[in-house]
Image: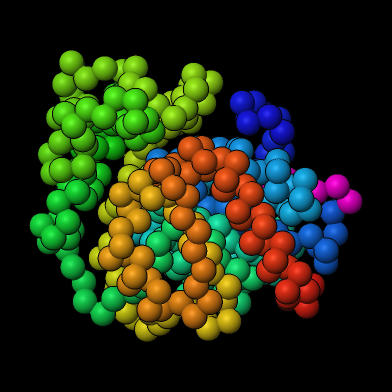
Amino acid sequence: MDPLKPESFKHRKEVLSTGRAYHFVDQLPVDYDPKRHPTLLCVHGFPDLWYGWRYQIGPWVRRGYRVVAPDMLGYGGSAKPTDAEEYTSKKLCADLAALLDVLGVRRAIVIGHDWGSYIAGRFALWQPDRLLALIIVPYTPPTREYIPLTEVVKRAPNLGYQLYFNDQKSSHEIPSHLGKFVGLMFADVSQYGNKQLDFTPKGALENILADPKTPTGLPTILNDTERAYYIQEFGKGMHGPLNYYRTSQCRHEEELAARLPAALSADLPYLFIWGTHDPTATPFVINKARKFISKYQDIAIEGRGHWLMVEAKDEVTKHISEWLEHLTCSHPREVSKL
């Protein structure tokens, strides 16, 4: 498994019982035994792929874990429904449960990043019997009141870019500027720190992408090989990935109808791992999450930003491995249920 050679991983594609086809990497440890080797289900965010876990898959497999990393719905080699309602967390969680069924895995340790954190957190609510533990960035509980995105952006102007993602025109415009888009999303802000390229305020992202003066070769956390792979895979379509931002009301209605609880199961081990320079991991979000999680533990990685799996690849691998080893040693009976 070479992180710079996607083809060196074991790829699979299966049609799930939900009717959707998923592409995923399924990497088994030596002498795999489901009773001895827990499964890690790694859920990526936006904009990402199974490839976001490339630096962790090999080390985790060598430590005795089965690692499964899907292209989430709409991405890469997975199905790409056009209707935004197909991307609600309820349906995505049903897909992940169906994927575990295909694998013959009853319960998994679920790890999420970015949108994958949101989906992983909802998986713990929609499919609580399928988790052994949860490792994510901040947990966001369901709410009783629906807040429209326009109001959300008024309260949090740094989320203004989501208005563009919510607009159907972004599905057509972003593919025309993939080089710039990847450069902005994976930017190494420590290298250029240009406030003029802050895409978060309302209206900023579309203007930056359309501006011919915006450089296509921004310094990023990716090397040339990684960047080329992302551009290749995102070139298969961005409508599906952007649909995740168009589901807020549908998600809310589904959760309200199901009366999903705000708190996670009291016996669910939970690890929050975050970079201190990640703008999504604010003190408010962190403190709010603590109220709904009994077995809360967190690890802060100093000086690192949003793309922890790349920016702090060794630290992420080490911290999660050590936490999992403690968990599996402390709960051997639970591991046997996998």
Residue 151: percent from the left, percent from the top? Answer: 12, 61
- As drawn, is 192 to the left or to the right of 228? left
Tell me if residue 28 is in the magenta stretch: yes
Residue 258: percent from the left, percent from the top? Answer: 39, 81
Front in this rendered view, residue 80 or 194: 194
Front in this rendered view, residue 225 or 321: 321
- As drawn, is 52 to the left or to the right of 195? right
Tell me if residue 248 is in the magenta stretch: no
Q: Main secondary structure of the magenta part?
A: loop
Query: In which image quadrant can residue 186 be found?
Result: top left
Where 129 sits versus 55, above or below?
below
Front in this rendered view, residue 175 or 159: 159
Residue 280: percent from the left, percent from the top? Answer: 32, 53
Where 239 sits versus 290, above or below?
above
- As drawn, is 264 to the left or to the right of 66? left
Query: Which of the colour schemes (rainbow, by chain, secondary structure, one colour) is used?
Result: rainbow
Start and end of the magenta stretch? Answer: 26-31
Query: Which residue is pictured at 40% across the width and 62% down the height?
Result: 138
Which quadrant of the figure contains the C terminus?
bottom right
Regarding residue 315, the answer to whether it shows in the image is yes
Query: Which residue is pictured at 38% across the width and 50% down the height?
Result: 276
Which quadrant of the figure contains the N terminus?
top right
Regarding residue 337, the answer to whether it shows in the image is no
Where 299 sits versus 78, above or below?
below
Query: Which residue is pictured at 32% across the width and 79% down the height?
Result: 256
- As drawn, is 234 to the left or to the right of 176? right
Query: Which residue is pictured at 63% across the width and 43% down the height?
Result: 56
